[in-house]
């Protein structure tokens, strides 16, 4: 078995030197200011050892990776009733697509496409004030990452709030089918802000630990979700975590993973590791170009693919 620390350092070095970096997202203007040359990686193994390299301690916008944690919270809150409002099938379309909603009664295909994540956020709100729901999401992340130093990048939130016309369309469309229960502005406000949470690779890999260990944080022994729920969240990550690039990600990396347009990816190697990578340049599906390549190298070198 190759040495994990050395493997992680090697990958960071190889990624730093690559000229092909993808395109930084610009549809949220604030994200366009990020350095495309950045690359970070952090891996927490089953013994709690952290192997990290590159820009692993630089905070970035987690964007859609937040949807793993909001799904976990919403399931904790309303249980399997959540699946009446959102499906769990891959969409085969872009993350911000609206086309399926009309034919499918306003029920989004899965909790990770934007429409689905907005429905999940609405379930977390369930009548509370947006500020309370956001506080709950942040506290949950700080708790599972064991790090109080996780916050919302207000500039990114405001930037998306100003330009999020598609998300507004999705939310209003779902409202017309009674899929949402709270005022659209409340739900979107919470959604934009949880997407704007900033975390480092190290914090994100720590936060993902419960998914590699049957729902339990391996170092504290504290149970975050049941083993059955952890297994199911991983299944949705594998099939839907990279939108219309989910098949390619499973084919190349072979792990459940969730990407964000900030260029981060959280991946889970069951019983072996929780992994976070970050490189801001994206591929055509809106997933981190070098992040995916780095994960492919890591799983190949460590023999971590689930297949
Ligand atoms: O709603 C949006 O478009 C963004 N806040 C999140 C999208 C995203 O991260 C898609 N991931 N690749």
Image (tube, rainbow, N blue to C red):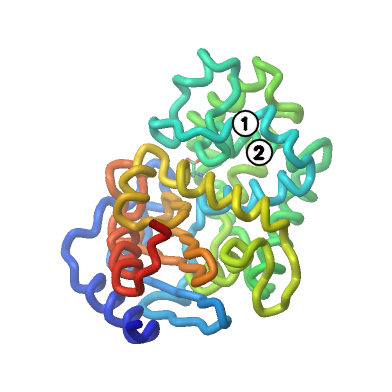
Q: Residue at x 51, y 74 (%)?
A: 202
Report the disc number at residue 274. Answer: none
Query: In the structure shown, which secondary structural element does the residue marked by tag 1 occupy?
Result: loop
What percent of the width, then of the height, locates residue 115?
55, 32
Query: Is residue 200 something one can see in this rendering?
Result: no
Left or right of residue 240, residue 188 in this image = right
Q: Are marks 2 and 1 in contact (CB under 8 Å)?
A: yes
- Label 2 environment density (alpha carbons within 10 Å; few <14, some 14–19, many ≥20): many
Instruction: Name the foreground residue: 106 vs 181.
Output: 106
Tell me which numbered mark, 2 or 1, is placed earlier along the sequence: 1
Depicted 5 relative to depicted 115: above or below: below
CA–CA distance in space, label 2 to label 1: 8 Å
Indicate left or right for 207 with 257 as reference.
right
| Residue at the far front in the pictured view | 307
- Rendered position, 194 above or below 264: above
Q: Nearer the viewer, residue 18 or 229?
A: 229
Look at the image and tell me in which quarter the C terminus lies: bottom left
The reply to whether residue 176 is in sight is yes
Tell me if the residue at label 1 has its CB under 8 Å from ligand 1: no
Task: Report which quarter residue 46 is drawn in.
Answer: bottom right
In terms of depth relative to the viewer, which is nearer, 149 or 299? 299
Which percent across, then down, holds residue 160? 51, 43
Residue at 34% from the left image edge and 61% from the top image edge:
291
Q: Is residue 126 left or right of residue 247?
A: right
Whether ligand 1 has any atom under 8 Å from the Cβ at mark 2 is answered as no
Circle 1 sits on which residue?
Answer: 86
Query: Is residue 258 shown left or right of residue 144?
Result: left
Mark 2: secondary structure: helix
Q: Residue 148, how many percent across, how many down?
A: 69, 73
Residue at the extreme left of the image, as rendered: 19
Image height of 69 relative to 299, above or below? above
Q: Which mark is residue 120?
A: 2
């Amino acid at each position: 078995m190759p040495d994990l620390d050395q493997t992680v350092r090697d990958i960071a070095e190889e990624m730093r030197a690559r000229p092909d970096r993808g395109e930084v997202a610009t549809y949220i203007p604030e994200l366009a200011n990020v350095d495309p040359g950045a690359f970070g990686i952090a891996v927490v193994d089953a013994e709690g050892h952290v192997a990290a390299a590159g820009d692993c301690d630089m905070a970035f916008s987690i964007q859609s990776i937040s949807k793993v944690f909001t799904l976990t919270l919403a399931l904790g809150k309303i249980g399997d009733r959540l699946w009446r409002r959102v499906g769990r099938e891959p969409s085969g379309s872009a993350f911000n697509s609206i086309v399926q909603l009309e034919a499918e009664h306003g029920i989004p295909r899965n909790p990770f496409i934007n429409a689905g994540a907005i429905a999940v956020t609405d379930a977390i709100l369930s009548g509370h004030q947006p500020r309370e729901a956001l506080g709950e999401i942040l506290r949950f992340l700080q708790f599972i990452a064991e790090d109080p130093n996780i916050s919302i990048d207000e500039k990114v939130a405001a930037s998306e709030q100003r330009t999020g016309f598609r998300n507004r369309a999705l939310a209003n469309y779902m409202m017309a089918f009674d899929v949402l229960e709270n005022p659209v502005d409340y739900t979107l406000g919470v959604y934009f802000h949880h997407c704007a949470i900033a975390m480092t690779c190290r914090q994100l890999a720590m936060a993902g630990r419960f998914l590699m260990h049957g729902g339990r944080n391996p170092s504290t022994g504290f149970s975050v979700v049941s083993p059955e729920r952890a297994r199911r969240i991983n299944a949705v990550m594998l099939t839907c975590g990279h939108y219309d690039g989910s098949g390619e990600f499973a084919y190349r990396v072979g792990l459940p993973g969730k990407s964000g347009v900030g260029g981060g990816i959280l991946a889970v190697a069951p019983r072996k590791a929780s992994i976070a990578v970050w490189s801001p340049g994206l591929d055509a599906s809106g997933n981190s170009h070098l992040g995916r390549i780095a994960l492919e190298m890591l799983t190949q070198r460590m023999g971590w693919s689930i297949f």
